[in-house]
Amino acid sequence: MMATLTALCFLVVCVPSTGAMFYYPSPAISLLEHILVDNWGAYASNFSAAITPCTNYVTEIGDAAPNSGRTTAAQWLRVGFHDFVTADVAAGTGGLDASIGFETFRDENKGSAFNDSFTFWRPFVNEFVPMADLVALGTVMSVNLCGGKYIPFRPGRVDATGADPTTGVPEPGSSLEETLAQFGRSGFNQADSIGLTACGHTMGSAHHSGFPEVSDNSTLSANNTNGGINFDTSRGAFDPLVVHEYIDGTGNRGGPLVTSFNETSRSDLRLYESDGNATMEELYAQGDGFQDTCVELLSRMLNTVPAQVVLQDAIQPVAIKPVNVTWDIIDEKQLVLSGKIRILDTEAETGRNVTISFSNGYSEVVKVENATGVSIFGVTQYAPFSIDGSKITDASSFTVLTDGLETAAFDIQDRAFIVPGLTEITGNTVFVTIAADANRDDFDASKLTVRVATPITQPLTLGPRMAFSDVQLEAAGGSLGDVRYWSGVVVVDQPVGAVSVRLSYGEEPLDIMLLDAGVAGW
């Protein structure tokens, strides 16, 4: 019998199944955990680059715009809010579903924030990571990386296929009645509406380029090319200063939607004063508790989804995580299991050893690399390994042990795998090779199937849609002991993100490999 086969190729760690799987616990959660945890340094996801530092701004074409007076972190919050607020909770429609990508032509969504954000997020979209989850994750990351408390991130959103038919986003010129009705439709009462607005306006600015009725052309300068007026005097920090400056009448006094030269554009002032400033006074008195209020309100915003969508439990950072682990066949001579073990801890440990023990009794000690990563959850270190398959024949699982952390166990499957060295995308053509132990009693080659998922452009939005193609497998030359090859080729549309190759045996998913993940990769 060939050595136990398992697969975690490129970005993805495992495939969901009713049986034991190799990795924790699904491709979607693993990929999103990577974005959430691996912020800077070694093997960073690059998602945090746009909001580092928090005063940074990245344009639609991906260029930094340090003199624009704009703030990507604040824009990401704005995108999340505009996507959410057209929800009709009574009808069970709208919410966080990335429909905002189809709605940028509406006057209520004027400005480049939406297309700028979608352009940055688009390479991260694949079969397992929808744009809607990235919209939510953008708010989570912006708040936490810029001084706010962590908002538990629940995955599982589903991308809309068109614009939300419901319209109506609070605008600078909206009346109080209109604003409260729009918030109320989405499930937020008056106090909630005031609190969410204050939380959303503790970062960023209102700009002449998008809102000349709020910020006149006197704000334009070489160091403020979009003519921004900051909401408070800490534009890139998620803190309670916007509330304090409003109540105390100091600094920016609550921002341009309170103080605009155009009284009809003072929408924040109308909202804050609608209960005699009682809610703003309460937020002021909370001190650092303001952060907890924002976590609660922003969580409700992010978790407002269409009625048919069920979100999963919040993702937890993984202390011990195998990444990029895959079987491969080297020079058609040697079966090798290789990859890395990521260690997430409070600090980097010099000389740390990691012990990998397989269920057949074989163990190996590997050392961590010198390169480390920095995370909002701690420090990451990586221990690479490469193990001859002959040493772990018949193993069905392995455990990982390192100093200071609990032992973690991972199951592996032994039916078939995608061969990384013989699987690639060139232009629009995907070449796939599968390896399996043809002499297993329970093996039937006719049950092997391969499906390719390609994120491609779709009209009227920068959010990709997924296109699926089946690969016809044929027996291929070459062998290694009892291992045989099957291969196939399929032509796909031009991808805008990582292309995923999924191997199944009948109805059982076995392996997934992501190709050309680019900026979003390990």
Image (cartoon, grey):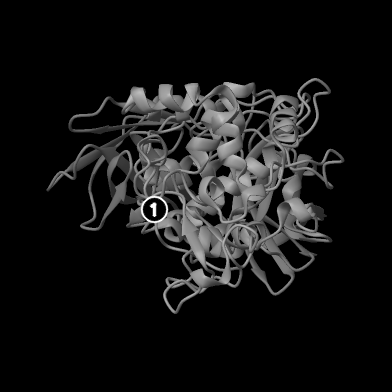
Label 1, residues with CA under 10 Å away: few <14, some 14-19, many ≥20: many
Q: Is residue 391 left or right of residue 127?
A: left
Q: Is residue 374 left or right of residue 483?
A: left
Which residue is pictured at 73% across the width and 56% down the height? 464
The quarter in which the C terminus is drawn is bottom left
Quick one: 376 or 465, which is closer to the camera? 376
In x, y percent, where is residue 346?
Answer: 22, 37
Q: Is residue 199 left or right of residue 215?
A: left
* Res. 269 image quadrant: top right
50 vs 288: above or below = below
Which residue is pictured at 46% across the width and 50% down the height? 231
Quick one: 130 or 318, which is closer to the camera? 130
Question: Extreme left residue here?
Answer: 350
In x, y percent, where is residue 103?
Answer: 78, 52
Question: Extreme bottom residue here?
Answer: 222
Q: Is residue 37 visible?
A: yes
Question: Extreme right residue here?
Answer: 165
245 vs 419: above or below = above
Which residue is identified by label 1?
A: 236
Q: What number of labels is visible?
A: 1
Quick one: 336 or 106, which is closer to the camera? 106
In x, y percent, where is residue 380?
Answer: 29, 46
Which residue is pictured at 76% across the width and 23% down the height? 89
Mark 1 is on which residue type?
Answer: Gly
Q: Is residue 481 visible?
A: no
Dot 1 lies on which element? loop
In x, y percent, where is residue 9?
Answer: 53, 51
